Amino acid sequence: MNEIEVFRKYVKESGLRNTPEREVIIEEIFLTHDHFDVDTLYLCLKNKKCSISKASIYRTIPLLIESGLIKEVFFEDGHMHYEHVLGHEHHCHFRCLGCGRIIEFKQDEVMDIEKKFSRSHGFEVTGHKLELFGYCRECLKKQGKDRKISTTDRVDID
Amino acid sequence: MNEIEVFRKYVKESGLRNTPEREVIIEEIFLTHDHFDVDTLYLCLKNKKCSISKASIYRTIPLLIESGLIKEVFFEDGHMHYEHVLGHEHHCHFRCLGCGRIIEFKQDEVMDIEKKFSRSHGFEVTGHKLELFGYCRECLKKQGKDRKISTTDRVDID
DNA sequence: ATTATTATTGAGAATCTATTGCAATAATAA
DNA sequence: TTATTATTGCAATAGATTCTCAATAATAAT
C-alpha cells in the first residue's frame, strides 16, 4: 500500500471525505521524496494550474500527520517544513553551508550516545536529531579547496 | 573580566551607551549559565518588577552576539534560544519533552561520525549539532514510569 | 436517481508571535 | 547647561497559521 492509498484509507476510516483538492495535494507531496513546506507546495500547484487554496493545504497537513505519512521538521528559517515518514527510516542531515542543500544519511552510532546518556542520567531518550554542517564536494571544488580531513581547523556552528 | 564587564567594554568601545535597561538585561542573563529565550527573559524581569520592554531585549541580543557573549541556538520548538559562550565549550543538548528543560552534555563520539561521513562523501565537515529528546527523571517519576533502557519502544522524534 | 446531510472549499478576516518604526526620553559630549 | 543622538516603550508591522462563513460537493438515505 503506497502513501496515497494509505491516505485514502485513513480518510475513509475517519469518516472524512475524499476530495479532488486532497488528491491533488497528496499527489504533489508524494511525487518526490523530498521535504516540503506549505508555501512551496502552494506555489508549485499554482504554477501547474491546479491551484489549491492555502487553507486547504494547511487543513490537509494534520491529516497527513495523523495518518503517519509525514512529520514536522523544524528548520532555521522561521516556518514549518515536513518530511515523509513511510519508507523513510530515521536519518540525519548534512547541510552544505555553501549551496544550502541538505543531504540525508544514516548511521547507528548515535544510538550508542543515546544509551550512554540515558544510563548516566536515568533519563528516557526517545529520539535524537543530528545535523552536520560543512561544504559539499561541489562547493569545495568551486572554492578551489581540497577536503580537509584534519579536525584541527574545525569550527563549531553550534 | 566577566561577562558583564566584557559587555560594558563592548558598548563603550562601539560608541554606544550604557543604560539601566541594558544592565538589568545582562545581569539577568548572566546570573545563571542557562539557555534563555526572549519571552522567558521578558516574563522573568516582569515578575521581578524590573520590567523591560521586549523591544529592548530584542535590541540587546545582537549586541551580546557581536560581543561574543552569547550565540543563537535553534531548538525544535519554533523560536530562537540563546546560550552563553564565554567559558562554555561545545556541547550537545538533551531536551525534556515533559517539562521542556534543556540539559547540556558533552561527548566526543560525534567526531567519529563526522570523520566517517567526511571520508565517505568527500565533504568537509566543519561542525555539528546533536540534540537528544526524551523525558528527564523528574518527568518519568511524575508519569509513574520507569526509565526504559530498551530501545525497542524507541520513537523517533525526527 | 433524488434528496438530505454535513464535510469541505476558498477568500479573506483574525490571530499569534517575532520584530521594527517612531516620537519621547535620557546618556554622553561639548 | 545645552546639544547631540542613542535608546526606550508603545504601537504598528510582517509573516505564518488558523478561523469564519457562505457556497459547494461528497456521501448516505430514501
Image (tube, coloured by chain):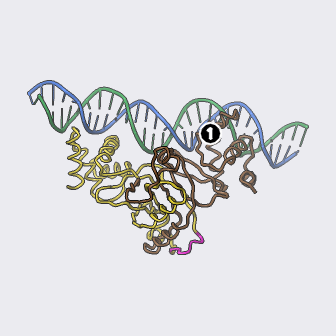
Chain colours: A brown, B yellow, C green, D blue
> Disc 1 designates what residue?
A55
Number of marks in picture: 1
The range drawn in magenta is B147-153
User: Could you tell whether B32 is left or right of B148 in the image?
Assistant: left
**Most foreground residue, A37 or B113:** B113
Q: Quadrant of the C terminus of chain B?
A: bottom right
Secondary structure, magenta segment, majority class: loop
Q: Is residue A108 visible?
A: yes
Residue A153, percent across and down? Answer: 38, 56
Q: Is residue B68 magenta?
A: no
Residue B117, percent across and down? Answer: 52, 60
User: Could you tell whether D23 is left or right of A129 in the image?
Assistant: right
- Residue at 46 percent across and 60 percent down: it is B130
Amino acid bearing label 1: Ala
Residue B81, percent across and down? Answer: 40, 52
- Residue at 59 percent across and 49 percent down: it is A82
Q: Which of the 4 quarters of the picture holds residue B128?
A: bottom left
Q: Quadrant of the N terminus of chain B?
A: bottom left
User: Could you tell whether A9 is left or right of B33 in the image?
Assistant: right
Secondary element at image label 1: helix
**Most foreground residue, B79 or A144:** A144
Residue B36, percent across and down? Answer: 36, 54
Q: Is residue B149 magenta?
A: yes
